[in-house]
Image (cartoon, helix red, strand yellow):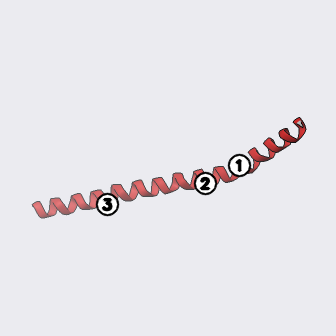
Amino acid sequence: MLAAKGRHEDIYDEFINHQWNTKRSRVTCWVIWISGLLLPMALAVYFKGYISLK
């Protein structure tokens, strides 16, 4: 009974950790993707405004 319970908890912990890891890596991917998309646009707008201000 105890052995089965311990094994079940291990599986549960692994599942939670796996879920958290995939979720975290997905968020990281989104952040990289969005920053990769927005950074050039932000730089372009900034430099455009900076040049036109001169």
Mark identifier at residue 32:
2
Q: Which residue is mark 3?
A: 14
Residue at the location (21% across, 60% down)?
A: 8
SS at circle 1:
helix
Amino acid type assigned to the residue bearing label 3 in the image: Glu
Q: Are marks 3 and 2 in contact (CB under 8 Å)?
A: no
Say which of marks 3 and 2 sits in front.
Answer: 2
Say which of marks 1 and 3 sits in front.
Answer: 1
Q: Which residue is mark 1?
A: 39
Q: Relative to 35, is 9 on the left or the right?
A: left
N-terminal of the two: label 1 or label 2?
2
Amino acid type assigned to the residue bearing label 2 in the image: Ile
User: Quick one: quadrant of the N terminus?
Assistant: bottom left
- Compared to 50, does 11 lie above or below? below
N-terminal of the two: label 3 or label 2?
3
SS at circle 3:
helix
Residue at the location (16% across, 59% down)?
A: 5
Residue at the location (33% across, 58% down)?
A: 15
Q: Relative to 41, is 33 on the left or the right?
A: left
- Tell me the distance, in whole angstroms, between the alpha carbons under discs 1 and 2: 10 Å
Q: Nearer the viewer, residue 8 or 25?
A: 25
- Tell me the distance, in whole angstroms, between the alpha carbons under discs 1 and 3: 36 Å
Q: Quadrant of residue 6?
A: bottom left
Question: Where does the image place residue 2, in percent across and percent down from the top left?
Answer: 10, 60
